[in-house]
Image (spheres, rainbow, N blue to C red):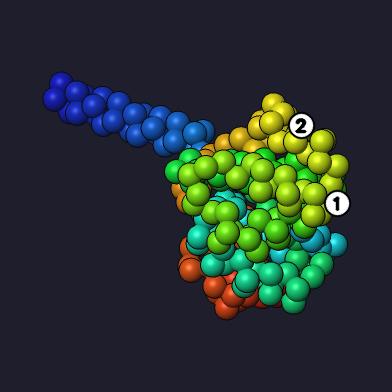
Amino acid sequence: MSTNLKVTLALVAVALLTVIGVVVANQNDRPTAAAGSEMLVRADSHRLSTAADGKATVVEFLDFECESCLAAYPGVEKLRAEYGDRITYVVRYFPIASHPNAYNAAHAAEAAARQGKFEPMYKKLFDTQNAWGHNQQSQAAVFEGFAQELGLDVAKFKADVVSAEVEARVKADAADGEALGVQGTPTFFINGTRFTDQPTYDGLKAAIDASLAS
């Protein structure tokens, strides 16, 4: 074997080993399916409905001050009424920093959740978004009024809203969203797959039906 051929073969071997190393490294950097699933739905995630058969799970990362979330909300509520406990519907917080009261609203929802009233507050925040949304002043007092209307212990609500635990809970949801590549709201995942079409009633319904049929 000539010296030139030996050098050529050695260079080819080094190149192959480099490529294999890059592929392995990239595979190790990718989140596993189990990790992705765990980040989508945590044990303490808020479920508006739970399907016994687990065939269809819809996860929505949302911001209560987001106009696009408000636009999707009527269709979501129609789907929830239609499918009931045939689907698991999970809500995750993803407040957008440029929305002046997004974090206040998320904290209000989480504080309500600690008194068993997440869903009523979730609905209240969206039903009234046009009144309180995109106001530069803090809407904390408005949210306290909602808590009173919903029959919550307002003193506990006010303490929870500003607690480190509630802040950490909201940030944990947002961190999961970021790790999953969420960049805006609303972002939906259906059975672990990101829904990339416009979140209309018809579009979401078709995806849910496909999950139920599989």
- Foreground residue among 166 and 80: 166
**Residue 149 figure quarter:** bottom right
Q: Residue at x 73, y 69 (%)?
A: 80
Tell me the number on the disc at residue 191.
none
Q: In this view, does 119 lie above or below 26?
A: below
- Foreground residue among 146 and 62: 146
- Residue at far top of view: 3
Alpha-carbon distance for marks 1 and 2? 16 Å
Residue 190 screen position, x and y as percent: 62, 61
Q: Which residue is drawn at 68% across and 53% down?
A: 91
Residue 88 screen position, x and y as percent: 75, 61
**Residue 106 figure quarter:** top right
Can residue 82 be seen here? The reply is yes
Residue 25 shown left or right of residue 209 in the figure: left
The residue tagged with tag 2: helix, strand or loop? helix
Residue 109 screen position, x and y as percent: 71, 47
Residue 90 shown left or right of residue 188 in the figure: right
Q: Which amino acid does label 1 sit on?
A: Gly
Residue under label 1 = 151
Residue under label 2 = 159
Looking at the image, tell me whether mark 1 or mark 2 is earlier in sequence order.
1
Q: What residue type is labelled 2?
A: Ala
